[in-house]
Image: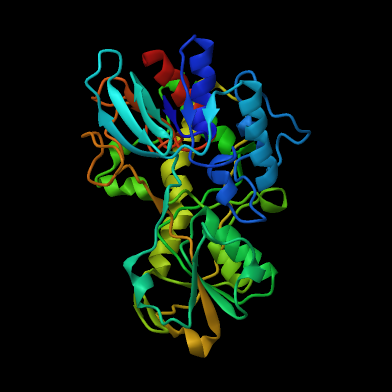
Amino acid sequence: MVVGAGQAGLIVSSLLRAVGREHVVLDRRSRLGGGWQDRWDAFRLVSPNWTTSVDGFPYRGTDPDGFMPRDELIDHFRAYAAAIAAPVELETDVTALDAHDGDAARYLLTTSRGPIAARSVVVAGGPFQVPHRPPQASAFDASIFQVHVAGYRNPDQLPPGGVLVVGSGQSGVQLAEELMAAGRPVTMAIGHCGRAPRTYRGRDLFWWLRQLGTAAQAYGVGLPTAAGFADPRARFACNPHLSGHGGGHDTNLRAMAAEGLRLTGRLEAVDGTRVQFAPDLAATLQFADQFFGDRLRPLCDTYVDRAGLDLPVEEPGQVAYEPPLVTGLDLAAEGISTVLWTSGYRPDFGWIHLPVVDEQGLPRQTAGLTDSPGLAFIGTPWMVDMGSANLVGVERDAKALVQRL
């Protein structure tokens, strides 16, 4: 049994069919398309179109280095499901997973369409499950309109006035650009997010992520893993900000600030329409500037050297602009009518009534397999490494998982 018919669940389904394993894919939605259906109207992939290719179903368009819009992406995965004849049961919400003492089945799934017994279960829940709002959200005055990125669709949805964007991951910077282009004054309370160049040494960032997660391992180089985290909560850190809009480009907060985006430190406290920000703006921007050089560039360069690749040396550019420090605002006085939460998501595996989830709500697993025989996960953040929850890593992880199952 596979729970979830997003891209991870569909890839697992294709691999299970290839080895002759009978299975069913359950999904709570009424239509295929996974969590991509929850993205905003102008959403585009941050990864290039070629990252949607999987064995037996390559990217079908004419622009492999472009960035697919939301509806085209949804159509792509629906076409993939049809091509592999995925045995998907839609409108089937799984509400509980328990141990089962039957001879032929280890697990019992409680669903909206009745109980289902299964010998093996692969949970393909994906990284976008429950929209996360910090506790400060409850302290805003009722006059301030609040919306999480999961519910945002376009600028016209928001009341007139300025917007406070909370969070500076991939969604945050893209929506800040969209709102500024629509003529909205935008303030962004930034989080501890790194940034990365769109291209390095002539290759897109996701080419590097794919290589580091696959071919580079033969040269003793790989993507960062969660084993290096001193604090397991670091698994919820935002992805480095980047954009697939306008043909794909870097998103440098300093450059955006020089063009009119007002930056602040982390949102610290809220009292009605008054907000306070931590005085950490300079330090957080410095972290963002150093992220690629500290975390990924050495891996890329080591791979190039060891593999003998002919890729010219490149020095990523920097922007020197230092935005002014803002430690507090009265949103009403500033004409800010909306708070847009781009503060990420949290896992929701509370329906699994087995000891396979840790204190942060993520599965206890090794390369997807748990200590409970036949129970596995796919597509969760940091399952194997940094690439596990995005398109460059899911197929790789799924192949290894199905072989072990």
Residue at horizontal 41 percent and vertical 46 percent from the top: 294
Q: Indicate whether 280 appears above or below 205.
A: below
Q: Position of residue 190 (x, y in %)?
A: 45, 65
- Residue 55, by quadrant, is top right
Residue at horizontal 52 percent and vertical 86 percent from the top: 334
Q: Indicate whether 109 appears above or below 272.
A: above
Lateral position of residue 33 relative to residue 283, left or right: right
Lateral position of residue 352 relative to residue 48, left or right: left
Residue at horizontal 38 percent and vertical 64 percent from the top: 283
Between 224 and 136, the residue placed more toward the observer is 136
Q: Position of residue 19 (x, y in %)?
A: 49, 9
Q: How is the image coloured?
A: rainbow
The answer to whether residue 367 shows anywhere in this view is no
Residue at horizontal 66 percent and vertical 22 percent from the top: 83
Residue that extends furthest to the top in the rendered view of this protein = 20
The answer to whether residue 117 shows anywhere in this view is yes
Between 91 and 317, the residue placed more toward the observer is 91
Q: Position of residue 268 (x, y in %)?
A: 34, 73
Q: Indicate whether 266 appears above or below 212.
A: below
Lateral position of residue 162 relative to residue 273, left or right: right
Q: Indicate whether 39 appears above or below 332.
A: above
Q: Position of residue 347 (x, y in %)?
A: 36, 46
Q: Quadrant of the N terminus?
A: top left
Q: Quadrant of the C terminus?
A: top left
Residue that extends furthest to the front in the rendered view of this protein = 114
**Number of callouts:** 0
Residue that extends furthest to the right in the rendered view of this protein = 62
